[in-house]
Image (tube, grey):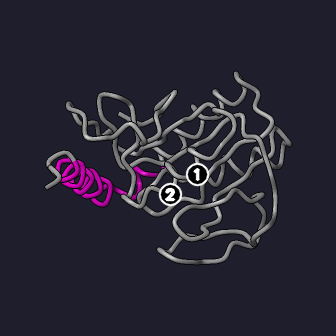
């Protein structure tokens, strides 16, 4: 019989982090969103990626939509976002309008593209001492990144720093190059 202790610890940790995220002030969130977006923009200006994988935020995630709009308006780089297909997603070019889909996630229309990302901005629920991602538990980002032929710079974003002081992740969980949060 398989020992589920690590998976149980990850699940408990995920619940604790999500609870922290749900009980944050809306006013404080706006300040945190702006700060985190400004730090991401600094990273983009430093590394100068041509193609960035971003995300359409849920309420408890960093709102990077103003950053996406700035990147597009100033033509700093191409921006792509997840388009859910089964148990994973594919990247599609960010464009309006956005449509609400499964899990309340908004997405642009589907398109067929093969893109090599230089950078990825990835939302997290939490992390551990290995800097690997704890998300919502569906493994979509892990499956997506495992199929890439390159290794883009991965920037994790988080409204409230939630880090386990022990290892709750597995080797297949994606690892951050940078974590940007608001303390």
Residue 160: x and y in percent read 34, 43
- The quadrant in which the N terminus is found is bottom left
Q: Secondary structure at mark 2?
A: helix
Q: Are marks 2 and 1 in contact (CB under 8 Å)?
A: yes
What residue is shown at x 66% (from left), y 77% (from top)?
A: 99
Main SS class of the magenta portion in the image: helix
Query: Mark 2 and mark 1: span between their CA atoms?
Result: 6 Å
- The quadrant in which the C terminus is found is top left
Q: Quadrant of residue 150?
A: top right
What residue is shown at x 79% (from left), y 47% (from top)?
A: 115
What residue is shown at x 52% (from left), y 38% (from top)?
A: 36
What residue is shown at x 58% (from left), y 51% (from top)?
A: 144
Tell me if 108 is positioned left or right of 173 in this view.
Answer: right
Q: Is residue 21 magenta?
A: yes
Tell me if 175 is positioned left or right of 8 in this view.
Answer: right
Please name whichever residue, 171 or 116, is drawn nearer the observer in this view of the structure.
171
Residue 175: x and y in percent read 46, 34
Q: Secondary structure at mark 1?
A: helix
Please name whichever residue, 172 or 46, is drawn nearer the observer in this view of the structure.
172
The residue pinned by badge 2 equals 140
């Amino acid at each position: 019989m398989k020992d589920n202790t690590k998976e149980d610890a990850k699940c408990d940790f995920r619940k604790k982090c999500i609870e922290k995220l749900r009980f944050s002030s809306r006013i404080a969130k706006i300040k945190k969103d702006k700060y985190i977006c400004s730090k991401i923009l600094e990273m983009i200006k430093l590394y100068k990626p041509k193609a960035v994988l971003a995300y359409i935020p849920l309420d408890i995630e960093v709102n990077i939509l103003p950053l996406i709009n700035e990147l597009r308006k100033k033509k700093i780089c191409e921006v792509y976002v997840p388009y859910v297909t089964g148990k994973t997603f594919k990247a599609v070019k960010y464009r309006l309008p956005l449509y609400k889909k499964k899990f309340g996630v908004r997405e642009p229309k589907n398109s067929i593209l093969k893109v090599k990302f230089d950078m990825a901005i990835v939302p997290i629920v939490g992390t551990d001492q290995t800097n690997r991602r704890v998300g919502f538990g569906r493994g979509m980002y892990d499956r997506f990144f495992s199929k890439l032929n390159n290794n883009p710079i991965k920037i994790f974003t988080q409204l409230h720093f939630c880090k386990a002081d022990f290892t709750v992740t597995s080797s297949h969980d994606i690892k951050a190059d940078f974590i940007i949060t608001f303390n």
